[in-house]
């Protein structure tokens, strides 16, 4: 079901265009991209249905159904995007990818640099437009908005001369932004005084001061072999894009054991899960104890919209909030502001903030538990007894201070407060 207020915003704007005009479709596409930017969407999806073309926007990480077009305008919208991106309009049977340059027509200038991909589906071509966010990747550690205690701890950790710092979180949790902020901090701390190298898959952001490399697995230059060769290049600090397999994990920990500081990311839902996954990958507890300095696990939560926060609300059908799969919650409504809020389009959220938990595995109780290979639940209890502030604790505090809503905590963590 479309999101009512977003639908109204788009419908009103579309009605101002002259249907039948030769320029109708180009103007319509201009308008869609412009409105998507107005609502801070990161992605625009045009999804062919049995009848019609569904427009969805991803805002603050969540997909919202806006409107559904019908009639012969549907394929023409996708065709217009393909023209803008320099794709082959007569090929609708293969996936294509292109970019709209940031100069030229109104649509292009308004949209900035955008990536357009198309994909053949049962009912026609689906188009996805990625509107590039520009500010995200240039942040420093103190600009990320991490909790103060974690920011301070990370600043200290980055001054270590050896060991592994593990940044974890699911995809879309902002850990890539954090790892690049850490690299910039390392450059700031050490300048040319230390050799900083990275091995990435792929390089997402260029960081001046770091010697960056991208793996080429098809010629045998993968992460594991790359780390071994990199050690002979005499670096002090290495960043490894993401540990995905036991061999890379082993190489990363061995590099730390031989006196290097290793910064890397890992896909895990919590710090405790990260530890248990490392053990499952065959990394010996003694190696974790002697080299792992900290695990940070982070999440992005949507912020309450400052305009409609504390305003009276009414219940509507859930278009804005996707419940986690397998959720026991069957309620069919969500709250929206009773008065239409133009700032958030009645989504009730505006922007996101990052929060994190940090596990210090060097605590005696935790390193003892690792040697004993206790299960995840027991390890979590021990971590809490040692004073670890969990993501759940941070989320509860964020709700208490009005920074987010309880529904958002449930969406992100899959757990109620
Ligand atoms: Zn609002």
Image (cartoon, grey):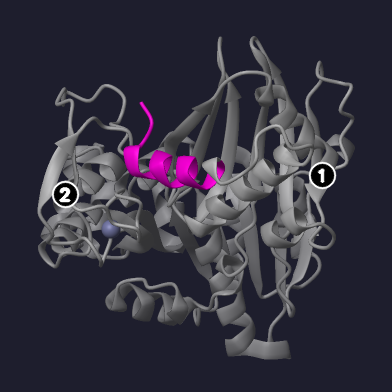
Say whether residue 8 is left or right of residue 340. Answer: right
| Circle 2 crowding by C-alpha within 10 Å: few under 14, some 14–19, many from 20 | few
* Residue in the picture at 73% in, 89% down: 192
Q: Which of 361 and 158 is in front in this view?
A: 158
* Residue in the picture at 50% in, 48% down: 266
The stretch drawn in magenta includes residue 3: yes
Residue 125 x, y percent position in the rendering: 70, 21
Residue 139 higher or lower than 97, as above or below: below
Residue 319 x, y percent position in the rendering: 32, 33
| Circle 1 crowding by C-alpha within 10 Å: few under 14, some 14–19, many from 20 | some
* Residue in the picture at 27% in, 43% down: 413
Judged from the image, the secondary structure of the residue bearing numbered disc 1 is helix
Can you tell which quarter of the image residue 110 is in?
bottom right
Judged from the image, the secondary structure of the residue bearing numbered disc 2 is loop
Residue 154 higher or lower than 175, as above or below: below
Residue 98 x, y percent position in the rendering: 81, 42
> Are circles 1 and 2 on residues that touch, CB within 8 Å?
no
Magenta segment boundaries in residue numbering: 1-14
Q: Which mark is residue 233?
A: none
Ligand number 1: quarter of image: bottom left
Q: Could one spot residue 416 in this view of the protein?
A: no
Q: Where is mark 2, residue-wise?
A: 338
Residue 119 higher or lower than 32, as above or below: above
Q: Nearer the viewer, residue 110 or 154?
A: 110
Q: Which of marks 1 and 2 is in front?
A: 2
Q: Please state the total of marks drawn on the protein image.
A: 2
* Residue in the picture at 81% in, 15% down: 93
Q: Could you tell me how far apart the alpha carbons at marks 1 and 2 are, in whole angstroms?
A: 40 Å
Q: Magenta part mainly helix, strand or loop? A: helix
Q: Where is mark 1, residue-wise?
A: 84
């Amino acid at each position: 079901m479309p999101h009512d207020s977003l639908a109204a915003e788009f419908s009103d704007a579309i009605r101002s265009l002259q249907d039948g005009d030769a320029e109708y479709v180009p103007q319509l596409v201009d308008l869609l991209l412009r409105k998507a930017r107005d609502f801070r969407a990161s992605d625009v999806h045009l999804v062919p249905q049995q009848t019609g073309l569904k427009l969805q926007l991803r805002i603050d990480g969540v997909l919202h159904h806006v409107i559904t077009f019908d009639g012969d305008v549907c394929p023409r919208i996708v065709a217009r995007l393909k023209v803008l991106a320099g794709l082959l309009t007569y090929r609708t049977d293969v996936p294509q990818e292109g970019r709209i340059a940031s100069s030229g027509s109104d649509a292009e200038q308004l949209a900035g640099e955008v990536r357009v991909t198309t994909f053949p589906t049962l009912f026609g071509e689906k188009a996805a437009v990625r509107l590039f966010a520009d500010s995200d990747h240039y942040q420093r550690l103190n600009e990320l908005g991490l909790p103060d205690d974690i920011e301070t701890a990370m600043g200290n950790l980055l001054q270590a001369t050896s060991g592994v710092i593990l940044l974890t979180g699911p995809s879309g949790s902002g850990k890539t932004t954090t790892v690049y902020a850490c690299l910039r901090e390392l450059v700031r701390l050490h300048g040319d005084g230390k050799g900083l190298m990275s091995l990435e898959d792929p390089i997402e952001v260029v960081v001046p001061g770091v010697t960056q490399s991208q793996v080429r697995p098809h010629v045998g230059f993968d992460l594991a072999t790359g780390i071994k060769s990199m050690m002979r290049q005499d670096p002090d600090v290495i960043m490894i894009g993401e540990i995905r397999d036991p061999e890379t994990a082993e190489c990363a920990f061995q590099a730390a054991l031989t006196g290097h500081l290793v910064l890397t990311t890992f896909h895990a839902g919590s710090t405790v899960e990260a530890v248990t996954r490392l053990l499952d990958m065959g990394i010996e507890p003694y190696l974790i104890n002697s080299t792992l300095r900290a695990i940070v696990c982070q999440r992005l939560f949507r912020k309450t919209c400052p305009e409609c926060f504390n305003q009276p609300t009414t219940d509507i059908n859930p278009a804005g909030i996707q419940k986690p799969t397998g959720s026991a919650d069957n309620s069919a409504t969500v709250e929206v502001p009773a008065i239409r809020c133009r700032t958030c389009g009645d989504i009730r959220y505006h922007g996101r903030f990052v929060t994190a938990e940090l596990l210090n595995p060097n605590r005696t109780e935790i390193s003892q538990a690792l040697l004993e290979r206790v299960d995840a639940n027991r390890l979590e209890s021990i971590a809490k007894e040692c004073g670890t502030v969990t993501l759940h604790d941070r989320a509860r505090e964020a709700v208490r201070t009005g920074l987010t809503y309880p529904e958002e905590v449930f969406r992100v963590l899959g757990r109620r407060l």
